[in-house]
Amino acid sequence: MTQDEALFQFLLRMGDSTLILGHRVSEWCGVAPVLEEDIALANTALDLIGQTQMWLGLAADIEGQGRDADQLAFLRDVWDFRNLLLTEMPNGDFGQTLMRQFLFDAWHSVQLGHLITSTDTRIAGIAAKASKEVAYHLERSAETVVALGDGSAESHKRMSQALEYLWPFANEMFVGDEVDAVLFKAGIAPDPASMRAEYDILVERVLDQATLTRPDKDFAHKGGKTGRQHTEHLGHLLATMQWLQRAYPNSKW
Amino acid sequence: MSQELPLFEVFIRGQHGMSHRHVGSLHAADESAAILAARDVYTRRNEGVSIWVVQAQHIAASSPSDKGPMFEPSESKIYRHPTFYDIPDEVGHM
């Protein structure tokens, strides 16, 4: 595997993760429990989709096949997507959405913290810009996880269930492969496994405040970032997200 | 309505503004949640550099029915406006 091939895969992993999560979060638009959360979720979705444009734009440049970010987002099928499985999981209730967001935001902030010092200045630049948005996402999702976890008996129960359900998918974030090894060696991206300790400290502090317990399972659902096996949920999401561009090819609006 | 979160009034200091101005209100569980919500609801288009929130119930307000005794007496006291001075040109815009 050449460095550019690895780089292309890595950029798809970043861009597809923000794209798919951004789309998932946007599904709350107009139907969130209260107006304030509706707008906040829409802002988060827009931030993530803005970051997608940068990651997939750079991916398309590296690929050099004449594709652009839009084509990568709207004209690939399930098996070509490289997003983390966590990001494609269904919204569930509001608590599950925020738990998913928190587990992702914590990883995202650690990941971007490392990427800011990437030897690839294009990646460092995107990471610097995105990290300010992500710091806010993390503050908000952590605060909501604490409020709901340490809230009523009902909200505590739902947050516990969401954590149990999502945890094995979050574990995928720390499973490295050849792509990661090539980029780590070149100083471009961190070794996923090495981020685990940093992540656990951050997550456990918040879960503790939320009176929730970090699941004691290391089992990881895998196959999202490698594209080997997505969950059954991604195809449905893409059908909605890509419908317009598929039905009316090359249309612009 | 007892399920509703408390109401907060939101004040934003704009990029060039000197003071915080009231921009609206929102519901939130507590002060810190209200500040985050205010950021998302009222500063999406780069409106502010600082946010204040206060629970609406903590604002003491004048009563609309007292409007007459409160405000009308000042209507006839034009001498309270500094319009009887000649301001030298050199002073410029005040």
Image (spheres, coloured by chain):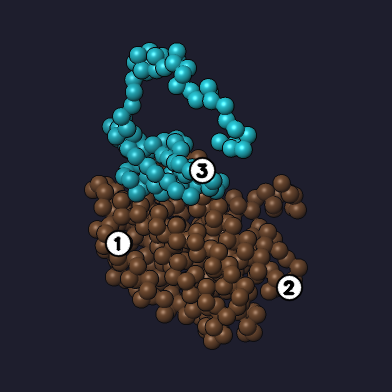
Chain colours: A brown, B cyan
Above or below, A251 relative to A231: above
Residue A38: percent from left, percent from top: 46, 43
Q: Which mark is residue A207?
A: 1
Relative depth, front residue between B65 and A110: B65
Reading the image, the residue beneath label 2 is A64
The kind of residue on which mark 1 rests is Leu
Reading the image, the residue beneath label 3 is B17
| Tag nearer the camera, 1 or 3 | 3
The kind of residue on which mark 2 rests is Gly
Estimate how packed mark 2 is, as few (under 14), some (14 to 19) or many (20 or more) residues with alpha carbons within 10 Å.
Answer: few
Residue B35: percent from left, percent from top: 39, 47
Is label 3 in a helix, a strand or a loop? loop
Please tell me which residue is depicted at 48% across the width and 43% down the height of the picture: B18
**Which subunit holds the residue at mark 2?**
A
Residue A200, located in which quarter of the rendered image? bottom left
**Callouts 1 and 2 on one subunit:** yes
The kind of residue on which mark 3 rests is Gly
Distance between mark 1 and mark 2 Cα atoms: 44 Å
Please tell me which residue is depicted at 48% across the width and 23% down the height of the picture: B81
Position of the C terminus of chain B, as image quadrant, is top right
Looking at marks 1 and 2 on the same chain, the residue that comes earlier in the sequence is marked by 2
Is label 2 in a helix, a strand or a loop? loop
Is label 1 in a helix, a strand or a loop? helix
**Whether residue A217 can be seen here:** yes
